[in-house]
């Protein structure tokens, strides 16, 4: 799990950082982002929507830059042998859950409201979905969210099958994109 947290944190951080840098360039010079590649994939249109600066009028990418570096740092700390108290794991799990809910809301907004897809956002979705659905049962199994034998047993039972929820989540996104953007896949 430590390596997984480091990998997911760094890969998601890179995508968020790229979005932040390109969003800054878009605001500063009007230069279109590198992921503005066709009428369907347009990070610039997503970046310029009100949804992209919902909290404190700050670009969402900045929260990703900070949050995913925390994920990578926690993974590195685990690799180094650090142990954290239960309150830390509860807050870390709540942070990952909040990011998951936020990203799924942004998925909904991009696909059904804004009407454009952002490739770097999609990278973050693709990385964070398994992070949430695999980390939660792992943390339960490890007793990080409570010492109850039932919680640990539930986490142990769920963990080998957590991939099913990942696949379902990906399928919902894939089908939504297919339905909303039928011309994207036409020949």
Image (tube, rainbow, N blue to C red):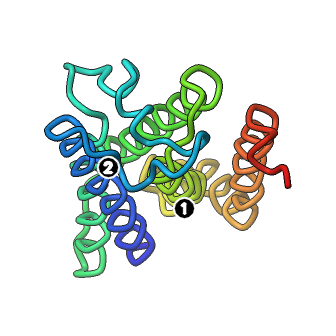
Looking at the rendered structure, the number of numbered marks drawn on it comes to 2
Which residue is at 72% across, 40% downward?
177
Front disc: 2 or 1: 2
Task: Provide residue 82's location: percent of width, then percent of height.
Answer: 22, 72
Which residue is at 36% across, 33% downward?
47
User: In this view, which residue lies farthest toward the right?
Assistant: 187
Image position of 119 with respect to 103: above or below: below
Residue closer to the observer: 175 or 92: 175
Q: Residues within 10 Å of mark 2 (few under 14, many from 20)?
A: many
Which of the labelled discs sits on residue 129, or is there none?
none
Mark 2: which secondary structure? helix
Residue to which mark 1 is pinned:
138
Residue to which mark 2 is pinned:
19
What distance separates the C-alpha of mark 2 from that of mark 1? Answer: 30 Å
Query: Split into 4 quadrants, where in the image is the C terminus?
Result: bottom right
User: In this view, which residue lies farthest toward the left?
Assistant: 28
Task: Provide residue 163's location: percent of width, then percent of height.
Answer: 71, 61
Image position of 83 with respect to 158: above or below: below
Mark 1: which secondary structure? helix
Which badge, 2 or 1, comes first in the chain's sequence?
A: 2
Kindly indicate the quadrant of the structure image that contains residue 8: bottom left
Residue closer to the observer: 10 or 15: 15
Task: Provide residue 142's location: percent of width, then percent of height.
Answer: 49, 63
Is 130 placed left or right of 70 in the picture? right
């Amino acid at each position: 799990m430590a390596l997984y947290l480091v990998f997911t944190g760094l890969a998601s951080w890179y995508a968020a950082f790229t979005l932040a840098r390109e969003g800054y360039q878009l605001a500063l010079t009007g230069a279109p982002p590198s992921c503005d590649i066709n009428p369907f994939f347009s990070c610039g249109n997503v970046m310029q929507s009100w949804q992209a600066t919902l909290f404190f009028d700050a670009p969402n990418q900045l929260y990703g830059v900070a949050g995913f570096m925390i994920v990578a740092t926690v993974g590195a700390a685990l690799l180094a042998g650090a142990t954290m108290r239960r309150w830390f794991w509860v807050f870390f799990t709540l942070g990952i859950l909040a990011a998951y809910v936020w990203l799924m809301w942004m998925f909904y907004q991009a696909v059904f409201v804004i009407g454009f897809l952002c490739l770097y956002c999609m990278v973050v979705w693709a990385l964070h979905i398994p992070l949430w659905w695999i980390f939660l049962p792992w943390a339960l199994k490890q007793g990080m969210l409570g010492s109850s034998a039932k919680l640990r047993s539930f986490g142990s039972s769920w963990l080998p099958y957590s991939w099913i929820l990942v696949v379902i989540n990906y399928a919902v996104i894939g089908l939504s994109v297919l339905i909303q953007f039928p011309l994207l896949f036409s020949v």
